[in-house]
Image (cartoon, helix red, strand yellow):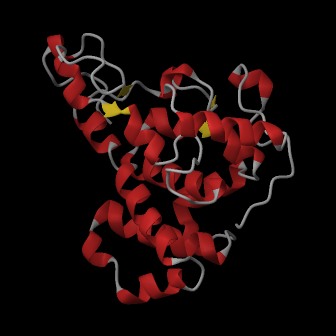
Amino acid sequence: MATTPRIPQEMLEGFFIQMERGEANDNPVAAISIPIELSRLAAIPVRTRKSFQLDPVLHELIRLYNAKVQDCQYCQNARQAVAVQAGLDEDMVSALSHFETSSLPEPVKAALRITSAVSTNPGLLSDEIWNQAAQHYTEDELVDIVLLSMHTTASKVTITLGLDPGKEASSRLFFPTEDVYGESPELAEAIRELRSQGVVVEGPSEEALPVGSKVVAAASSV
């Protein structure tokens, strides 16, 4: 993993992984940042009406699988708080490195086969892999799995340019109310709905919701 920036110093000024569109039009860093709108569309940090409609645990497993494949230290260290409350635990995360022989549910394995192909060589995505996944997911869900698998390979750029901030820079748990995700009517609506269900949507990451704990018994399709 590259830890020394490989790009001109002027491009590092104000660098952050995500930015609002138009936030830094005069700063070349805008060209290497992920628009916040794109992350919200990908249901990071939470599913909304206009985002990918995937189960939060499956969503987070796909994100973390790619984080491991790309060796993004920042992404590997972080966990979606909503997914943790929906049942994500560290045994699941550890199993991602050998998911085929793991005890992960078959629907999760079917989705990860798609993610694995997308992250390495899309030509490996055979009809057999697609049809296996189609036994567990709708066509819309399959498209969202592909799109999320593509979105979460974006860390390749950050790592190649030597801009992975490292695990020390990431929140162990990230919540949908954090400022970095900006504001949108859809995000606000999703946060209100989660709160009504008793889901913790904000807090000091380490104290509010220790990784591996389950604050609410949220339903999960995995």
Residue 174 percent across, percent down from the top left: 61, 31
Q: Quadrant of residue 150?
A: bottom left
Q: Residue furthest left?
A: 8
**Position above or below: 145 against 200:** below
Residue at the (19%, 15%) spot, across then down:
27
Residue 117's place in the image compared with 211, above or below, is below
At a point 50% along the width and 67% down the height, the residue shown is 112
Horizontally, residue 195 falls left or right of residue 161, namely: right
Is residue 221 in sight in this rendering?
yes
User: Looking at this view, is 189 or 115 the one in front?
Assistant: 189
The residue drawn where x is 68% and y is 72% is 105
Q: Nearer the viewer, residue 100 or 172?
A: 172
Q: Is residue 178 above or below residue 52?
A: above
Q: Quadrant of the N terminus?
A: top left
Q: Position of residue 67 (x, y in %)?
A: 45, 46
The x, y position of residue 133, in whole percent, is 52, 80
Looking at the image, can residue 78 be seen? no
Horizontally, residue 172 falls left or right of residue 112, namely right
- Coordinates of residue 48 in the picture (x, y in percent): 57, 47
Count of residue discs: 0
**Corner quadrant of residue 204:** top right
- Residue 129 to residue 27: above or below: below
Quadrant of the drawing holding the C terminus: bottom right
**Most distant residue in the front direction:** 185
Residue depicted at 30% across the width and 77% down the height: 124
Residue nearer the viewer, 24 or 119: 24
